[in-house]
Amino acid sequence: MRICFGLLFLILGLKQVTCAQDLPRPAVDVELLVQELFAQQDDENPVAYEDLYETLLQYYRQPLDLNRASREELRGLWLLSEGQISALLQHIQDNGRLLSLYELQAIPGFDLLTIRRLLPFVTVQALGQMGQRTWKERLKAADTHTLLFRYDRTLQERRGYTPPEGRSTTRYRGSPDKYLLRYRLSHPRDFSFGITAEKDAGESFTWNPGQRLYGFDFLSAHAQLYDRGAFKTIALGDYQLQFGQGLLLSSGLSVGKGSETITTVRRSQLGIRPHTSTLETNFFRGIAATHRWRQLETTLFLSSRRVDASAGDALPEDSTVFTLGGLQTSGLHRTPTELANRQRAREQVLGGNVTYRNPMQTFSLGLTALHTSYSTALQQKPEPYNRFTFSGRQNTAVGLQYSYLWQNFNFFGETARSGNGGLGTVNGVLASLSEKVEVALLYRYYARDFQTLYGAAFGEGSRNQNESGLYTGVKLKLSNRWQLTGYYDRFSFPWLRYRVDAPSDGEGYMLRLQFMPSKTTLLYGQYQYERKSRNETVEGEALRQVTDTHAHRYLLLLDVSPLPSLRLRSRVQASRFRQNGPARTGFFAAQDISWEHKGTRISARYALFDTDDYETRLYVPEQDVLYAFSIPVFTGRGTHVYLLLQQQLGRHLDIWFKLSLTHYRGQDTVSSGLEQIQGTQRTDVRVQARYRFKVFSGK
């Protein structure tokens, strides 16, 4: 019955469409990008979607000029294979600069799927735009001078906003309102200035300089200049760093194993980039600069900021001196405990990177070094799986990275050593065997005592530690409209892990078949399997044993635009989970519709879900307001609907409104802990306004 119902959703969207006649720059489709590029969310190995999304948004706000883009910048899009990048650069070299995005269709290897993904993030500048601009011309550039405000609230009362029995104060110290304020002034390859302020739901809006509270709970600002003489980048304020394969410096930027099995395996050396998201971890605060001399790029940076950490134990030699527990990464400061942990320690990081690139951009070799220190020693919980996790006050790490392009083979890797002598290495090759066949191989080894605090290289675990594995990815372009992608990954963990009280191993693979009959229709089906070990309590005994879990995930999606202003998207997802017992299942089916006319855009979804338990939960991306993303998790039984409205008011003001309602069946509460709601439904409201300033031109 479930399968029949799901197929009904898909049939609603089936319709023959005609090919589009032009190549406009469409709005960024976050929902589809997350599904196509990024790894599926997992509680054990969470994906920093906001960081990934912000990186893509930088390209969307300031599209990459294909006529001026370097090979490394093209790699940073995650959308082009090495063969496609080489074909694009060769086309420009042989035929001169691109005059129109139409020319992409004539470049070997650029199929409909690639061009569809690429269009929101690239541009081809006219001849008059290639030279130097005055400051007035820079300020007139579109979407470079904006002010954005966002408001969120869950309408139902959650347990955290009620006082415990016998007390008058609520558990959460602030209101259930969430605010975001963002100002940005920027111009591609020239400068970027920005301020971000956020108050999460439950946090108080307080002015108390003594406790480093200035209204909004989180404040961030950045200023970056580009191409100033011999300096490629100069940064002041909040920034992020990405070098090599991210083994030492990736600022949380890790795509993981997703449906894109080739281009996302390799990390790109993005260097210094502004921190513009609301993530309160994995960024630096201070100064950084990249200097160019011939084929040598040298980056130096210094960061000093306060970080969240839990309280530890008293040191035995002095009962008045305490260590810290672990670093806190949630960024939430709602309860007295969370407030006490807020900015408890000072973290200082200094280091640099030196990279050599040959004139042809086919070979690079770099050295990275960084020293991290804390004002108070860190001490992890005394659990066996934490035996080799970083503890203490300081860590010094050094790494060597390389990349070599030979014909259609790109060899890349990075090897690093942490301060305690632990080693980590990741090495791979991307091969374009033909225009229709691409292969990726990647081997990683992270010793159990390898300690990296800002690394997020390719791996199965949330940290690059205690893991080895071999990944194989393949992409087959069966025709200009059919594409088959897949991967197989085998991994092992020599030491204990959280919820795994023994050395273990596992494997995972994925297959996706995509069909794009026209520029406005996309259909694909995907199957993913993963085997991992986990503790299991023996019934009736105080004993835990490690056994295998088997997780299966299925996805079927149809995206079609029967009219230029109308878009339909049908989705069916399913899951199956088993660990030494009967298998449990989960199911989700949704129908989306989007309509756009002039300055108005309306999107809506109606969905049904039915899961047996939390293990069969389903993460499903959905459309959201600009510069935001939403990937709710569905567990239990019920329905989910949302309505998203975007309206342009004049030339400078845009507003968004989103109403989301989830109704559960067969249960009396929603969620758990302090987020628990008494009742059967949850309603969320989000309002956003963006003002694009009109810059005075003068004479």
Image (spheres, rainbow, N blue to C red):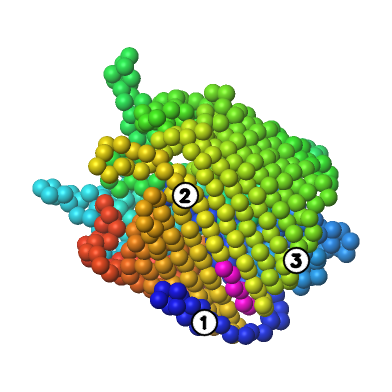
Question: Residue 217: horizontal and vertical position, in percent?
Answer: 37, 48
Q: Quadrant location of residue 286? A: top right
Q: Residue furthest left?
A: 166
Above-or-below relation of 636 to 448: below
The Cα atoms of the two marked residues, 3 and 1, are separated by 30 Å
Disc 1 is placed on an element classified as helix
Res 395 visible: yes
Residue of label 2: 46
Nearest the camera: 310 or 177?
Answer: 310
The type of residue carrying mark 1 is Ile
**How many discs appear?**
3
Res 148 visible: no
Residue of label 1: 11
Q: Residue furthest top?
A: 317
Task: Say left or right for 65 vs 329.
Answer: right
Residue of label 3: 110
The type of residue carrying mark 2 is Pro
Disc 3 is placed on an element classified as loop
Q: Residue at x 30, y 48 (%)?
A: 334
Question: Residue 218: horizontal and vertical position, in percent?
Answer: 41, 48
The Cα atoms of the two marked residues, 3 and 2, are separated by 32 Å
Above-or-below relation of 669 to 347: below
Q: Which residues are magenta?
A: 520-525
